[in-house]
Amino acid sequence: MQFPRMLRVRQKFDAPRLNDISSEVAQQLAKLNLGQQVKPGQTVAISAGSRGINNIAIIIKAICDHVRSIGGVPIIVPAMGSHGGGTAAGQREIIEGYGITEEFCGAEIRSSMETVIVDHTPQGIPVHFDKHAFNCDHVIVCGRIKPHTGFVGPIESGLHKMMLIGLGKHEGAKIYHRAIADFTFLEIIRAVAKSVLEKCRVIAGVGIVENAYDETGRIEAVAPADFYDREVELMKLARQWMPRLPFKNVQLLIVDQIGKNISGTGMDTNVIGRKYNDHAATEQDDYKVRRIFVRGLTEATHGNATGLGIAEFTNKHTVEQIDRKITQINCITGNHPSAAGTPAWFDTDREVLENALPSVGIVEPPFVKVVQIPNTLHLGEVLVSESYLDELKTRPDLEVIEGPFEMQFNADGSLQPVLAAAGH
């Protein structure tokens, strides 16, 4: 079969970036005058999540440094719902893999799956909160603010979700995701957040917004009373700064890697246009992708293949990487069991393409509109097929830096990843 020829394209995003991360964290927290609340020797729990947030170890360390500077004792608490296989050791391993270690941060890590039920919402939902965090004198909630891969609303993924799903651990994540089947996400998130803010001694939030190149674009310390209003505004900024595919219509999207460190669904449904339906774009999606081929899992995802079920095709290599138990725990907890599915798979990438290209429609394989990306978080450089050439000429935000060239395969039939293809 003749495959499409590819071009390497660089995307130009508007991308503000912070350079001195530690100083920005210190300045932001200083504005809240936390020393008026934290007494010498009091413990302050700091949430550390499972997402692959750029500079997250530096940010967590800077929060620990500030707590120490006002006389407090920082305690790092893994906050990631059911990730890490729903185990304390697994969750600790994830944050340490990001560089959030006791040695680097100068703070004890307390990891547990135990929760305390601190309240019940008006809907009758028990409010779970991490036992170690609840036993501390104060709590600082830290998290990235961005569009969620499934929830829709004025706030989606951020400080509120960290209080619910992250610090709610496996038990909280299970009950909240089940409740969202009967109530709106906004109803649940506001009700649970109200209880947490009233009962769990939260003194601050540290919101992170990344730019389209996965760089730290903004850090903002937020007082608890302002969590909702500020998160609404920061969500608008996060949506504006999100990375995106170079074209809105794609017949075959090739994704080199998916993983929990990339997105909650392994690949960001806001990017691939499948937020509302696993296998088809809807009128609410900005991007329309006909077929998806996932080539592998990230090392940092530890076999968690959540989101693989959204793709139509994969290869033997990816299937062999899957930790079925971890994947199923995460997807069922998130009330998205179909995300744990296994697509049609073949031994090699070449075989996948021989089957995937004819499935997009009546267009002949060499002329299929193909986009190949490293993952849905890093979209600065991508490969696109020659069929986009006319459109490329009209797009000043896209720069062709190499090609066209033939799709490149290794001797074992595996396709070269974006960052290694052609002259790279």
Image (cartoon, rainbow, N blue to C red):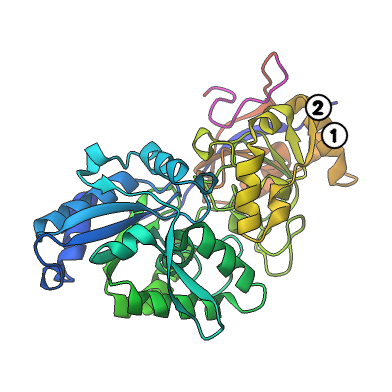
Residue 288 at least partly seen: no
Q: Which residue is mark 1?
A: 355
Q: Is residue 53 magenta?
A: no
Tell me which residue sits at (54%, 81%) in the image. 187
Whether residue 189 appears in this view of the structure is: yes
Q: Residues within 10 Å of mark 2 (few under 14, many from 20)?
A: some
Q: Position of residue 236 (x, y in %)?
A: 45, 70
Q: State the predominant SS element of the stretch in magenta.
A: loop
Residue at image position (73%, 56%) is 278
- 223 left or right of 180 in image: left
Q: Three-letter amino acid code at disc 2?
A: Glu
Provide the residue designation for mark 2. Answer: 351
Segment tinted magenta in the rendering:
412-423
Dot 2 and dot 1 residues touching (CB under 8 Å):
yes
Question: Which residue is at the far bottom?
Answer: 122
**Side of 382 where 137 appears, left or right:** left
**Residue 209, placed above or below residue 325:** below
Q: Is residue 68 above or below residue 378?
A: below
